[in-house]
Amino acid sequence: MTTIRFFAAARAAVGVDEVTVTAPDLGTALGGVDATDPSRWLALQERCSYLVDGVTTRDRSTSLEGVAVVDVMPPFAGG
């Protein structure tokens, strides 16, 4: 199982701080998130960076095998 944590605009689109998923890869996990604002969540996924156990990626084919935590990081103003 992998915990996905949402920050800033991602948290607003999804409606929760975190979810726990079982998925083979990042894209499948993100696609299975039950968001309160699905269209916003779908659009936001293209702009986010993801920390997969602390390693930055934008590749949604990244395997989640053995991954404990994914942080969803939308673009932040001010750097």
Image: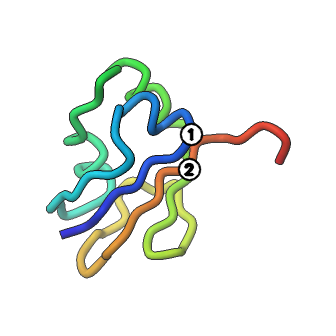
Q: Is residue 41 above or below residue 39?
A: below
User: Going by the picture, which residue comes out furthest to the right?
Assistant: 78
Crowding near pointer 1: few (<14 within 10 Å), some, many (20+)? Answer: few
Are the residues tagged 2 and 1 within 8 Å (C-beta)? yes
Q: Is residue 36 left or right of residue 17?
A: left
Front residue of 30 and 78: 78
Q: Which type of secondary structure does the marked residue at label 2 adopt? A: strand
Looking at the picture, which amino acid does disc 2 mark?
Met
Image coordinates for residue 19, horizontal then vertical, percent = 26, 52
Residue 34 on image: x %, y % = 21, 34
Image location (x, y in percent) of residue 45: 45, 37
Q: Which residue is mark 1?
A: 8
**Residue 35, relative to residue 1: is it above or below?**
above
Residue 60 left/right relative to 31: right
Determine which residue is flagged by label 2: 73
Numbered disc 1: secondary structure? loop
Type of the residue with mark 1 = Ala
Distance (Cα) linking label 2 and label 1: 8 Å
* Rendered-image quadrant of the N terminus: bottom left
Foreground label between 2 and 1: 1
